[in-house]
Image: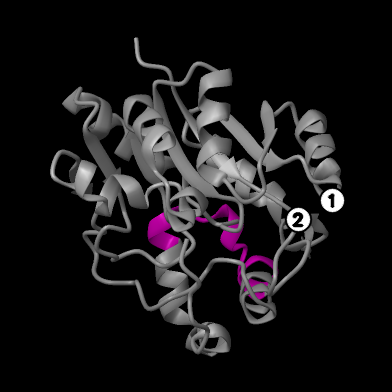
Amino acid sequence: MQHAGIISQVRMGSTRLPNKVLLPADSRPLLDYHVARLRQSGLPIFLATTTEPADDVLAAYAKAHDLPYHRGSETDVLARYYETAQRYGLDTIVRVTSDCPLVDGPLIGDAVARYLAENNPLVYRSNSVVRTYPRGLDFEIFSMELLAEAYAHATLPYEREHVTPYLKTNPATAGRVIQRNEVWPGGDFSRFRITLDTPEDYEVLRALIERHNAADLPVTDLLALLVAHPEIMALNAHIEQKTT
């Protein structure tokens, strides 16, 4: 039996929006929405934070919300993922980032079912190989076997920081890894940002959650909401995405 789980990387440090995951929307920290929506996947959730003192508050959050967690390197995020997966005995890893408060759990659960049905540890499945979803609904699914290989052999700082580039682009693995892309059947929504990286992103998320109950919407209704409110989505349309 495969042991699949979601590992969400989380830290308080941010160059463009410090302490972002605990900023409030409708009187709740945005991290609450992230966790609540992930729970709808039916998969266990693990927080991967850092050993920095600033992240003590996140360890306390994990304990208060009965979330297993691991603390590791701030910069070597690949090692943090590997250590978390190893500590909790995961065979299949779903990677998400905690700056996505509107991430969709059922979407992830369905993708994991497709991944497991292939029963192939060389498969990498994501909805960001070719984007049709907004930024902020991203997920990646891969095996412990691939994660361990990347952990052992990735040498570039970029590969260590962003976890999966070694699997997708390094000549040592790119020819063997089978990339599967999750495409939204209702069209291309990749122009929208519902991630949390800047003050403008925060303004968008607060408007969606506080005025339109976005945190309670399934993905189909959420995407329709983005289309229906161009005045909100224009607030962060100019933001350039940092590589993740």
Secondary structure type for disc 2: loop
Q: Please give the residue where the numbered disc 1 appears in the rendered image.
A: 54
Residue 107: in sight, yes or no? no
Callout 2, which amino acid? Met
Count residues near mark 1 (Cα–Cα under 10 Å), then give few for <14, some for 14-19, many for 20+.
few
> Left or right: 196 with respect to 238?
right
Q: Main secondary structure of the magenta part?
A: helix
Frontmost residue, 139 versus 226: 139
Relative side of 21 to 86, left or right: right
Judge by depth and name the residue closer to the eye, 226 or 64: 64
Mark 2 sits on what residue?
Answer: 12
Residue 130 lies in quadrant: bottom left
**What span is in magenta?**
207-221
Image quadrant assignment for residue 115:
top left
- Please, what is the three-letter code of the amino acid marked with disc 1? Ala
Do residues under tags 1 and 2 come within 8 Å of each other at their CB atoms?
Answer: yes
